Amino acid sequence: MIPPANLSHPVSSANASACPSRETLELLLLIRHFEETLLRLFQSGKIHGTTHTCLGQEYIPVAVMPLLRDDDFVFSNHRGHGHYLARFRDPEGLLAEIMGREGGTCDGVGGSQHLRRDRYISTGVQGESLPVAVGAALQLRRKKRGGLAVPFIGDGTWGQGAVYEALNMAALWNAPVVVIVENNGIAQTTVRSANMAGNIEGRARAFGVEYLRCTGHEAEALQARLAPELDRVRQSGAPLVVEFETRRLAAHSKGDDTRTPEEVAALRAIDWGADYQARWPEIFAEVDARMRDRMAAIVEEVESRALSSWSNR
Amino acid sequence: MTNTGERSTSERIIENLNRALHALLDGDDRVFFLGEDVLDPYGGAFKAARGLSTKYPDRVLTTPISELGFVGVANGLSLAGQRPIVEIMFGDFIFLAFDQIINFAAKSVSMYGRRVPHHLLIRCPVGGHRGYGATHSQSVQKHFLGVPDLDLFELSPLHDNTALLPRILARDHPGILFESKVLYAQPQLGEGAIDDLFTCEFLDEERMTAHVFVDRDPQAILIASGGSFPACWQAARQLLLEHEIEVQIVVPFQLYPFEVQSLAPLLSTAPALYVVEEGTAGGTWGAEVAAVVAEAWPHRAPVRLIHSADSIIPSARHLERDVLVQPENIVKRVSTDLHAIHPRSHHQ
């Protein structure tokens, strides 16, 4: 159940303390174990290519996806495993995709950062999906059923001109786009202070686009905060930028972290996982163990599958 | 236009194109039209869009100066099941939209493991001869060659846009139509006699590959891009009248992938073969055609390439003229190659 929203100020850990539902906790920890499993599989040479894990950011798609309908378009990015898992709860399909095995979401052709399923689509080029989202949103508005186009981007994505061209057109044409910004403060290895003048709020408001800032890492409280905002966009069509202050716990990709161990340790100390574990130790331990076992079983099963084939090209 | 003789129609090419666009928007409410300054009464920089926004106001979008952005918007409309047409004001600006064209539109068709239709037509005015200078005169076609699921087409006076544009847009993958700006004001031609000497027929049922000839065995064939057809036509007249060399001209509507099958009856008899285009030297469309021909007929003589100089396009009339392919360049090249210079007594 979703707790009632406190609309008077941004949600944070300090003012929302309800224990998350088992379902929410399962999804959060499924994503966490999925990502940690991937890093281990890379280390042992069982996966070819690259990956970008969302460790530390799992709660954002867990908060957002339940608010989206089947006819909404979701645009994900290179760091998109959490988005996919929260949308479809299909770790088998995603792992098979990344391992190039039968039953992969895109038969192993797309890989980690090029996934497409129904109205979910991801790409590895920063900012590319924003103008595309505006076009999809125009058609959704034409259908008059309240559909949304929801691109997920990072703070680094704001370096791309496509973002501004898209915000301008979305505002001009009243395109129901909700941009979810996962601001983890670092673009690959470049910290925000080295690549962004001003801030995201100022950039959104410059186009007359509504802006909402979300702090804290309690998925259900964030979801309750967002629900009326998304409903408003469904009704009005006016685009919205939602910025989540978050943190990336792992490297950009596999082993390319230039931050000091102390910096990363400081982030881990304020991680949602550590916080949840401390506040709800029993249910956390139970679900954590179950998701760890589930991922281990999934790896074993997917590894036993045949290599994928690319027949419909 | 320096050619003489009867015309098959009094319609201008821009009018034929405009009629084709009207028919597309009229016949299918999934068709959108996007571009800069495309609303009436202006109707786009070259007037191809004239009347569209008045008749279809909810499906014609005039955009900000954001090529990357509005090609992306068209991609989003396509993703949502629509069939957008995009106008790039000057072809040189299409580079701003390269990511959306290559990385999204073309790759989306196959990079997700199974074929996903992506309907999109990008119209792209190109070419020089108007003194607009380096950033408004380029022939950009060669930069889009060799992209999987991206078809390239070129406007010509011989091809009927009202028949061909619907077929491009019905394909399950994106296409770019390059349009030589100097063609717009010229008469729309077609099958039949195009002047007192030359006749046009199509080599295929879809009427994609035009064949322009005099009723004799040719000594050379020019494969011409649509935009270079007028120069080739003028050169062919001159070669015939002044040098007694008969050349035929083949004009494919589809530049890439280059379809060689319909040319088999012509090319297997092995006269000299040239590819003529306005694009500048290096990595040309002609080089692609030559490679395809060499693959199909390994023992033919090499295909010869006629193109503009290795240069930016300068503004001043005399400088631009020196860079771009002119009819006399074609005449000189072909007549010299064939060692058959027999000037007639009455040449001008």
Image (cartoon, coloured by chain):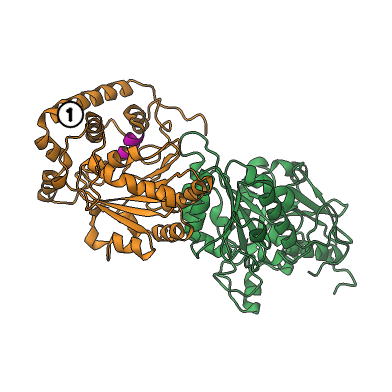
Does residue B208 lie above or below A303 as drawn?
below
Q: Mark 1 points at which residue?
A: A288
Q: Is residue A74 left or right of residue B312?
A: left
Residue drawn at the location 32% of the way across and 44% of the way down = A227
Q: How many labels does the image show?
A: 1
Residue B47 appearing in the image: yes
Chain identifier, orange in the render: A
Q: What stretch is highlighted in magenta?
A: A82-87
Tell whether B103 sits left or right of B43.
left
Q: Mark 1 lies on which chain?
A: A
Quadrant including the N terminus of chain A: top left
Question: Residue A52, image x and y in percent?
Answer: 29, 42
Residue at 32% from the left image edge and 24% from the top image edge: A302
Mark 1, secondary structure of its residue: helix
Closer to the camera, A256 or B348? A256
Q: In which quarter of the image is residue B234?
A: bottom right
On the image, the x and y values in percent for residue B120 come to: 58, 48
In-front residue for pair A265/A173: A173
| Chain B, hue in figure | green
Dominant secondary structure of the residues highlighted in magenta in the image: helix
* A139 in the magenta segment: no
The answer to whether B252 is drawn above or below residue B242 in the figure is above
Mark 1 surroundings: few (<14), some (14-19) or many (≥20) residues within 10 A: many
Q: Residue A223: x, y in percent?
A: 28, 42
